[in-house]
Amino acid sequence: METNHPELPGLWLPLVTPFRDGKLDETSLHRLVAHYAAQPVDGLILGATTGEGLSLDDAEAQLLVSVTSAALGAAGRNIPIYLGISGADTRKIGKALERSAGWGMQGYLIACPYYTRPSQEGLFQHFSALADSTDKPIIIYNIPYRTGVNLGNETMLRLAGRTNIVGVKDCCADPAQSFDLVRRKPADFAVLTGEDAFYYSALTQGADGAILASAHVHTRAFAAIRTRLLAGDQPGALADWQQLADIPRLLFSEPSPGAIKYWLWRQGLIDSPEMRLPMVSVSEGLAGRIEQAIAEEK
Ligand SMILES: O=C(O)C1=N[C@H](C(=O)O)C[C@H](O)C1
């Protein structure tokens, strides 16, 4: 793929944000980043859905970026960090882009404005205005079942013409829309699936990669599927996917990132599975199923 952003294709991890006693847990964050720095992860997204970005204030988001950069640096790993931003007011998001410009991440993942359900023209003008507010690359996050609005392919392709709108995290939940986009997109615009359960099928239909919360666990196995497909080994990739396909179902059987945090906590990667309200811990039933999955790993 020819692209002005060769770092985009691949497997990205939307990192959980560890909390302890109500605060961002820097020690766990450092340990977690060091762990993934040694894994085949091509980029990190901070403060997105999985990172509970809506419950972080500016100071915490900045700390998240600086601790993550420092941990990657200490591990000698140079992969891009994008910061998740969401909101429903173009002006406020534009100000957030200005305030965060010097924080040290390489780009932004920006969700479609939620709740107000703007028209396609409104969405076009929204993302155009945001692209004007920053020099950094932007990945659009299209997730209609969370925001209430679907950014259609005609609008996406108009936005793909902007030099710093470099890709989409595609969670449109409509495989026909995703395939149509992959077929028509310019070469320098990356389609990264964010539908964990569609990971294998999205890659076989030409997606450039993925942003997958599920890849917090079995990271190497998730990465290997893409590697096999790129090497032309589709049967091998399918066999691998058949082993992994239950993982997204398990991790998303209750609101995410509860299950992922529980799993990471039980593995000693974070010191607490704590989340911020309105997110609450996994049920006893799900905790038991995760315990069993961890035991089966060994
Ligand atoms: O953190 C994210 O961003 C992700 N969001 C998707 C969602 O909102 O459900 C899932 C994806 O794996 C990561």
Image (cartoon, rainbow, N blue to C red):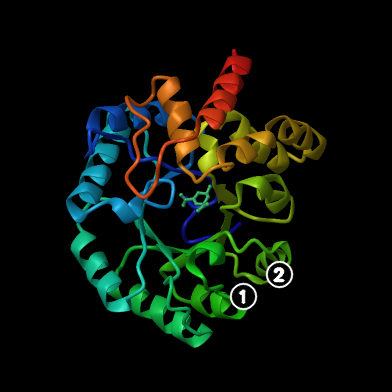
**Front residue (pair 114, 160):** 114
Name which quarter of the figure residue 220 lies in: top right
**Front residue (pair 120, 224):** 120
Name which quarter of the figure residue 188 lies in: bottom right
Label drawn at residue 180: 2
- Element at label 2: helix
Circle 2: is it few (<14), some (14-19), or many (20+) Cα within 10 Å?
A: few
At which x and y percent is residue 109? 41, 59
Q: Is residue 232 visible?
A: yes
At which x and y percent is residue 161? 50, 77
At which x and y percent is residue 136? 33, 63
Residue 189 to residue 200: above or below: below
What residue appears at the point 48 percent right and 41 percent down from the top-left corner?
A: 42
- Element at label 1: helix
Q: Earlier in the sequence, mark 2 or mark 1?
A: 1
Evaluate if marks 2 and 1 touch, with contact meaning CB atoms under 8 Å apart. yes
What residue appears at the point 56 percent right and 26 percent down from the top-left corner?
A: 290
User: Residue placed farthest to the front in the image?
Assistant: 284
Circle 1: is it few (<14), some (14-19), or many (20+) Cα within 10 Å?
A: some
Instruction: Determine if the C-beta at disc 1 is less than 8 A from ligand 1.
Output: no
At which x and y percent is residue 170? 57, 60
The amino acid marked with disc number 2 is: Asp
Label drawn at residue 153: 1
For the C terminus, the image quarter is top right
What residue appears at the point 21 percent right and 47 percent down from the top-left corner?
A: 60
**Front residue (pair 59, 164):** 59
